[in-house]
Structures are given as C-alpha cells and as structure tokens.
Image (tube, helix red, strand yellow):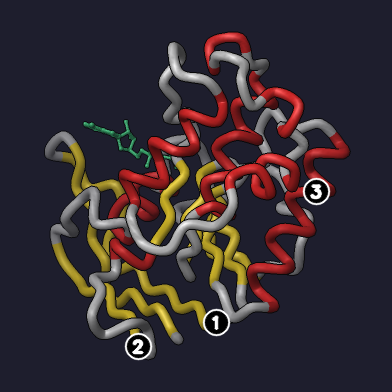
C-alpha cells in the first residue's frame, strides 16, 4: 500500500495555504507533518481524508482495498476530540463504531488499551483533556482502518499516555498500517518528516 500526493494546492478562504506539495508514504511508515502555525498541516490531513477538496493536484492510494474509497480507509482524528458530552465513554465509542461501520473490535478491550476501562460508564463531559484524547484514540482500535490521519495526537497526553500511544502506533505500523500525523512535538516513534512552508 502506498499513499501519494502530487502537486497539491490548498486554498482556504480565497488564500493559497500551500501549492505544489508532494508527499509519499508506504505501508509500515509514519510521516510527521511539521511547519509553523497556519502552514496547512491540518488542511493537508483534511484533504487526504476527503473533508476538503484540493484546488490542484492529486492524491492516490495504490494497493488499498479497491472496493473502498480512500476516505473509507482512513481514520481522521482532529485536534478537537469529537465526543458527545452527554453520552458515556462506552456510548461514545459505540456511536463512532456505528458511524464508521465495518468490522468492530471489542470496545472493552479498546478502552483497556487506552487506560479508560474504569471509566466506561462515565459521561464524556466529565473526562479530563487527556482522558478525552485517550477516548478518541480508542476509536482507532475499535474500528480498524489502515491509514491513520492524526492531528496533534499526543496533545494533552501524560508521559504514560504518550508511551501507550507510541506502542499502539508501532503495532499499527507493524501490521502494515500507515500514519500521517501533524505535530509540533516529537511523535515518539520513527517517522519521516514532511515540512510544509518555512521553518516553524
Ligand atoms: N474554514 C476556513 N476558512 C478560511 N481559512 C481557513 C479555514 N480553516 C483554516 N483556514 C486557514 O488555513 C490556513 C491553514 O490552517 P491549518 O489549520 O491547516 O494550519 P496548521 O498548520 O494546522 O496550523 P496549526 O499549527 O496552528 O494547527 C490558516 O491560515 C487558517 O487561517
């Protein structure tokens, strides 16, 4: 599996964010997208996820599932955790599994893997910032998709959480997954750097 972007141009609010951007990532590889604030890291992830349309250029996935779109093979985790505060931790995960579709892995196991099994019945409104992020990460495990698009994934995670997430990312890569992460801090795994715009 290989994901390739060629000559990508992104325009937002009538302004060029970036143009002529090339990138490439293969199965088992992580790409760390870096650059100053506003350089277009989130925008690139959203282009790949199909949430924005490029003003120019192409994105192609070779060797993926021919019956699924690129977006259907991606997990997109935005920097704002998309949780419903009135639903419990377990209900939020169940909502996402229904929304995303496909094969569903055991939610209790996913919550245990991110250290939230003790909080399954707690309303998401009561979670701390780090716990909200952990719940978002549980989505990656409950519904398996090969391409992880992650926006500032380690933000709000404590040291143990960063170690836990490093292990999850390494396991995903070892299974032939691919990770593209926008980040201002080291990801905690071996990753190739894709710099957008000037030096941050
Ligand atoms: N909905 C929108 N309408 C117009 N402009 C937008 C919109 N969303 C983002 N932008 C602009 O696009 C540019 C790139 O934003 P983006 O969020 O991709 O940057 P980023 O590199 O992820 O930034 P940061 O490091 O601050 O998270 C910014 O100048 C931003 O103001």
**Of circles 3 and 1, which is in front?**
3
The image quadrant that residue 73 belongs to is bottom left
Q: Which residue is mark 3?
A: 164
- Above or below, comparing residue 73 to residue 15 in the picture: below
Q: Which is more N-terminal, label 2 or label 3?
A: 2
- What's the residue at 55%, 82% (across, down)? 27
Q: Which quarter of the rendering shows the C terminus?
A: top right
Compute the Cα span from label 1 to label 2.
Answer: 10 Å
Q: What residue occupies the far right of the structure in this picture? A: 160
- Picture coordinates of residue 2, whole percent (x, y): 44, 84
- Above or below, comparing residue 187 to residue 161 in the picture: below
Label 1 CA crowd tier, 10 Å (few <14, some 14–19, many 20+): many
- Above or below, comparing residue 81 to residue 196 in the picture: above
The front one of 49 and 171 is: 171
The answer to whether the beta carbon of the residue marked 2 is less than 8 Å from any atom of ligand 1 is: no
Q: Which is more N-terminal, label 1 or label 3?
A: 1
The front one of 25 and 70 is: 70
- Whether residue 156 is visible here, answered yes or no, is yes
Compute the Cα span from label 3 to label 2.
Answer: 30 Å
- What's the residue at 64%, 78% (across, down)? 175
Query: Which quadrant of the frame does ligand 1 lie within?
Result: top left
Compute the Cα span from label 3 to label 1.
Answer: 21 Å
- What's the residue at 42%, 30% (across, down)? 82
Query: SS of the residue at dot 2?
Result: strand
Q: Which mark is residue 62?
A: 2
> Quick check: 168 left or right of 90?
right
Contact? badges 3 and 1 (CB < 8 Å) = no
Q: Which residue is mark 1?
A: 27
């Amino acid at each position: 599996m290989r994901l390739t972007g060629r000559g990508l141009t992104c325009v937002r609010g009538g302004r060029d964010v970036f143009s002529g951007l090339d990138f490439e990532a293969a199965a088992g590889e992580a790409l760390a997208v870096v650059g100053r604030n506003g350089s277009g890291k989130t925008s690139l992830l959203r282009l790949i996820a199909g949430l924005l349309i490029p003003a120019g250029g192409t994105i192609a996935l070779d060797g993926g599932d021919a019956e699924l779109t690129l977006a259907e093979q991606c997990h997109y985790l935005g920097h704002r955790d998309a949780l419903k505060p009135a639903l419990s931790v377990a209900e939020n995960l169940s909502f996402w599994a229904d929304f995303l579709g496909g094969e569903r892995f055991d939610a209790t196991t996913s919550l245990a893997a991110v250290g939230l099994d003790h909080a399954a019945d707690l309303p998401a409104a009561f979670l701390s910032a780090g716990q909200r992020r952990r719940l978002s990460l549980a989505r990656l495990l409950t519904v398996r998709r090969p391409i992880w698009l992650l926006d500032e994934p380690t933000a709000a995670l404590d040291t143990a959480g960063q170690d836990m997430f490093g292990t999850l990312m390494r396991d995903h890569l070892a299974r032939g997954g691919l990770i593209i992460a926008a980040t201002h801090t080291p990801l905690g795994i071996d990753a190739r750097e894709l710099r957008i715009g000037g030096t941050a």
